[in-house]
Amino acid sequence: MLGAERAGLGERLAAGERAGLSKRERALVEHAEALTRDPAGVSRASLDRLRSARLGDIEILDATQVIGYMAYVNRIAQGLGVDLEGDGRLGRGPSGGD
C-alpha cells in the first residue's frame, strides 16, 4: 500500500477493516491487536501464524518490540495527559481534563 491507499488506514484498521491487506499485513495487525489486548495470550500458535505469513523470527521480534514500544509510549502519554501533537506539556491531553 502506498500514498493515497494509506490515507485513513489507522481508522479503517481500528474499525476492523482488513480489505486490501496482504496475508503478511493481516498477520501483523492481528499480532498487534493480540499483544495489545492480551499479551499473556500470545502463544506458540500465534507465532506460528506469523511464520506461516512468511515472517522470520527476527521480523517477529522487531514487530513485537515496535508494538510494545508504541503501547508503552501511548500509556505514558495518556497517563500524564500529554498531547503528543500539541506543546507536550503535562495535563493538557485528552485525559488531562483540559
Image: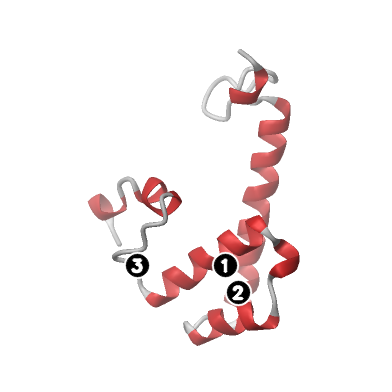
Under circle 3, the secondary element is loop
Q: Is residue 27 left or right of residue 42?
A: left
Q: Look at discs 2 and 3 and give the one toward the viewer.
A: 3
Residue 31's disc is: 1
Does 81 appear above or below 36? above
* Residue bearing the label numbered 3: 21
Quote the CA–CA distance across marks 2 and 3. Answer: 18 Å
Mark 2, secondary structure of its residue: helix
Q: Evaluate if marks 2 and 1 touch, with contact meaning CB atoms under 8 Å apart.
A: yes
Question: From mark 3 to mark 1, how far is it between C-alphas?
Answer: 14 Å
- Residue 37: x, y in percent? 65, 56
Q: Is residue 16 above or below residue 50?
A: above
Q: Amino acid at mark 1?
A: His
The quarter holding residue 33 reads bottom right
Please name the amino acid that badge 3 sits on.
Answer: Leu
Q: Amino acid at mark 2?
A: Ile
- Which residue appears farthest toward the left when viewing the image? 4
Q: Quadrant of the C terminus?
A: top right
Residue placed under numbered mark 2 in the picture: 60
Estimate the x, y position of residue 83 in percent, counting from the top left.
58, 25
